[in-house]
Each structure stands twice: as structure tokens, then as C-alpha cells.
Amino acid sequence: MINIAQKTCTTEDGHTVMVLTPAGRLDITTAWQFRLKLQECISKHSPHVVVNLGQVNFIDSSGLTSLLAGMREADKISGSFRICNLHSEAKLVFEVTMMDTVFEIFDTEEQVLKTSPRILASQ
């Protein structure tokens, strides 16, 4: 089981953004739960999602796949999907797999929320 904190934020330009903060390991045993949470947030709350990975100290291919699935879901409905606050161990996995070139990754949650989801989605 993975603990996933969830909060709703509003950007400076008025867009609603869901911020999910999983804690612990995002691996084969927990990725499916995280993927379901992403799908629920995107379909029921907002097409704009930020995943704060500051408390994820391990991520494997299953975890990366759940993030890719979330990004695709958001893209389907003209949303945005961004990642922030990568833990150093998780950052290494993103770099080795070149996923750091696939996702929009920010240093902090505050930086993400200062950027309009529409601007990011259209780039």
C-alpha cells in the first residue's frame, strides 16, 4: 500500500490543479494503486496534475509506467501533467531511462503552480 496525499490548488490564472504526493516506494507492488489514483483525479477533479515525488525514494519501471499512463490520460483531454521535487534516487532513474526528457520536471511545487497549465500543454 502506498500513501498518496492529495490537494487541490489554483494557479495564478485560475486553473484548478491536482497535486499528488506519493510517499515511499513507487514499484510493482504500489504502481497500480498510484495509477488508479491518477486516473480518478484526472477524470473527476482536473485534467491538470502535478506529481510531487519528493517523498518517493525508489521508483522502478512499473512506477514510470504509471506516470506515463497519467500523462497520456491528461493529454487525451487537453490537460497537463508535470512532475516536481524529484528525490535524488528517483532522479537517477529518470536520467538513466531518459524519462527526464519525456516529462516536464520542475524543482519545486511552487515553480509548477506559477506556470499556466495551458501554456505548458500547448508547447
Image: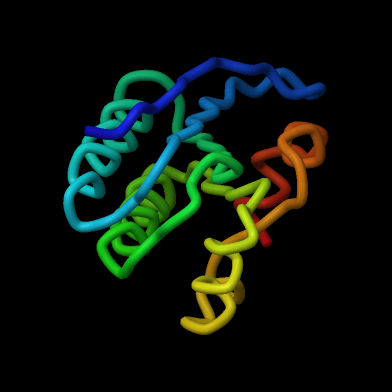
x and y percent of residue 40 in the render?
Answer: 27, 27
Name the quadrant of the C terminus: bottom right
* 115 relative to 31, above or below: above
Along the line of sight, the residue nearer the viewer: 8 or 13: 8
Q: How is the image coloured?
A: rainbow
* 2 relative to 121, above or below: above
At 65% from the left and 23% from the top, the residue drawn is 15
* 123 relative to 97, above or below: above
Counting every numbered tag in the picture gives: 0
Q: Give the quadrant of residue 35.
A: top left
70 left or right of 98?
A: left
85 left or right of 77?
A: right
x and y percent of residue 50 in the render?
Answer: 56, 38
x and y percent of residue 5 in the render?
Answer: 45, 22
73 left or right of 116?
A: left
At 58% from the left and 26% from the top, the residue drawn is 17
Along the line of sight, the residue nearer the viewer: 59 or 34: 59
Q: Give the quadrant of residue 14.
A: top right
x and y percent of residue 68 in the render?
Answer: 37, 60
Q: Give the quadrant of residue 2.
A: top left
* 3 relative to 122, above or below: above
At 41% from the left and 41% from the top, the residue drawn is 24
Along the line of sight, the residue nearer the viewer: 37 or 15: 37
59 left or right of 10?
A: left
Name the quadrant of the N terminus: top left
At 35% from the left and 27% from the top, the residue drawn is 3
